[in-house]
């Protein structure tokens, strides 16, 4: 009973989906996970509603939504298993969903619907699940295949699939096990860091803005220069320690430590012209006029830092008005760090794609496969990382050797 066609380590999105597809091909499949809870990252994703894919993913050029040292690696799998393929599966299981914005699809009811769907697919393939089962050691067998030592016994398998995800959100059980296995078998690793993560700022320098915690507004945000420049138009959220919200989560994956980010806090407003117009016609305090163009708390925070702005619009010097407009439309600031893996949605970096097949996800170590987040492929916010989980898992499951 402890000999299998394939053992998949990691019962998350990629692992469960791979198991279901492989099992329905007739393979004898075992999924093991060190946690006693399955698919916890699915359960908490999308505010509990699971942003399970993004229908705007361009199958002909998917790499524009993904970060990797080899941005074209993901193209093969993503073009062969598309968002529509997963949507069809969701329809098949009768799961109601909606599009939020920018192609992002969420369950109407709960992320539990997706978990139940994956488990139903596993059941259809006769998959065996073992939870609270940690792998103590992995050995390559002389005749091919692998032996896994666990507290629940010794498992032998022809194919081993690592689907353990990354380092993000350790409180739900994230570990470095997948990277350790890659290293054990001589595979290269790309440096890991937190991605899709809130950014933090020095306490004293941030003091004038800490009072804005909870304020959200649409912004333009960018980082990098020339060829490395990245720009997003998304919502920003002020926190006590820094900045969050979709805009900052997106840019965090491109931000490099010690470099600035630039924010346009009024992307829909021509601030210099509007402020000059107010100066000509208004007898109100500048702060009151500014509050018609940006959120009032934001207006108060900026005006409160400069005595020259704390007067009627007509009385504010042109130089001070122009300086204010520039500050709000091109606010340049350098984060001191990020909230790290405890708040990160994904892990950047991972198993080097140079050591993997883009067609099958098999590594240069025969019979050893890697899928999902553990690979150096990281998607944008908005369902792209789940689609990579589904696509890489599907590519792997289809490529696994058939039943013994």
Image (cartoon, helix red, strand yellow):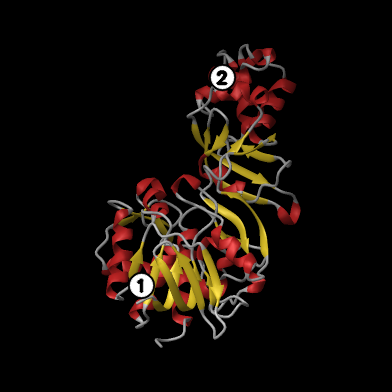
> Toward which corner of the image does residue 368 lie, by quadrant?
bottom right
Question: In the figure, is residue 55 to the left or right of 115?
Answer: right
Which secondary structure lies at badge 1?
helix
Determine if residue 116 is in view.
Answer: yes
Q: Viewer-proximal residue, 239 or 141?
A: 141
Residue plotted at (64% across, 65% down): 183
Q: Residue 147 in the image: x percent, y percent?
A: 49, 74
Residue plotted at (51% across, 62% down): 136
Q: Which mark is residue 308?
A: none
Label 2 Cα neighbours within 10 Å, binned few <14 / some 14-19 / many ≥20: some
Q: Which mark is residue 20?
A: 1
Q: Earlier in the sequence, mark 1 or mark 2?
A: 1
The extreme left residue here reads 94
Question: In the figure, is residue 96 to the left or right of 60?
Answer: left
Position of the N terminus, as image quadrant, is: bottom left
Q: Viewer-proximal residue, 6 or 246?
A: 6
């Amino acid at each position: 009973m402890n000999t299998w066609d394939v053992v998949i380590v990691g019962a998350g999105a990629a692992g469960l989906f791979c198991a279901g597809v492989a099992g329905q091909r007739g393979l004898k499949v075992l999924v093991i996970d060190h946690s006693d809870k399955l698919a916890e990252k699915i359960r908490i994703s999308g505010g509990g509603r699971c942003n399970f894919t993004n229908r705007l993913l361009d199958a002909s050029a998917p790499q524009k939504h993904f970060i990797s040292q080899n941005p074209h690696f993901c193209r093969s799998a993503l073009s062969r298993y598309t968002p529509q393929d997963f949507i069809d599966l969701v329809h098949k299981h009768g799961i109601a969903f909606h599009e939020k914005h920018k192609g992002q699809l969420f369950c109407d009811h709960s992320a539990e619907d997706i978990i139940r769907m994956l488990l139903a697919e596993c059941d259809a393939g006769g998959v065996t699940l073992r939870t609270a089962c940690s792998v103590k050691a992995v050995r390559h067998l002389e005749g091919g295949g692998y032996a896994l030592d666990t507290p629940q016994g010794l498992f032998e398998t022809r194919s081993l699939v690592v689907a353990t995800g990354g380092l993000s959100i350790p409180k739900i059980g994230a570990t470095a096990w997948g990277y350790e296995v890659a290293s054990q078998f001589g595979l290269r690793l790309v440096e890991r860091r937190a991605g899709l993560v809130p950014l933090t700022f020095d306490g004293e320098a941030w003091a004038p803005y800490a009072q804005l915690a909870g304020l959200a507004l649409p912004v333009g945000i960018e980082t990098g220069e020339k060829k490395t420049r990245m720009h997003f138009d998304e919502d920003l959220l002020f926190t006590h320690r820094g900045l969050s919200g979709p805009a900052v989560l997106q840019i965090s994956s491109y931000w490099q430590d010690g470099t600035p980010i630039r924010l346009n806090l009024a992307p829909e407003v021509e601030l210099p012209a509007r402020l000059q117009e107010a100066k000509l016609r208004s007898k109100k305090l500048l702060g009151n006029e500014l509050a018609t163009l940006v959120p009032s708390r934001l207006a108060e925070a900026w005006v409160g830092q400069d005595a020259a702005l704390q007067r009627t619009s007509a009385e504010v010097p042109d130089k001070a008005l122009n300086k204010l407009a520039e500050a709000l439309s091109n606010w340049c600031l350098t984060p001191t760090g990020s909230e790290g893996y405890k708040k990160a949605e994904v892990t950047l970096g991972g198993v080097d794609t140079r050591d993997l097949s883009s067609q099958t996800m098999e590594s240069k170590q025969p019979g050893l496969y890697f899928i999902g987040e553990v690979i150096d492929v990281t998607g944008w916010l908005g369902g792209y990382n789940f689609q990579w989980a589904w696509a890489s898992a599907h590519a792997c499951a289809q490529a696994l050797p058939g039943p013994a």
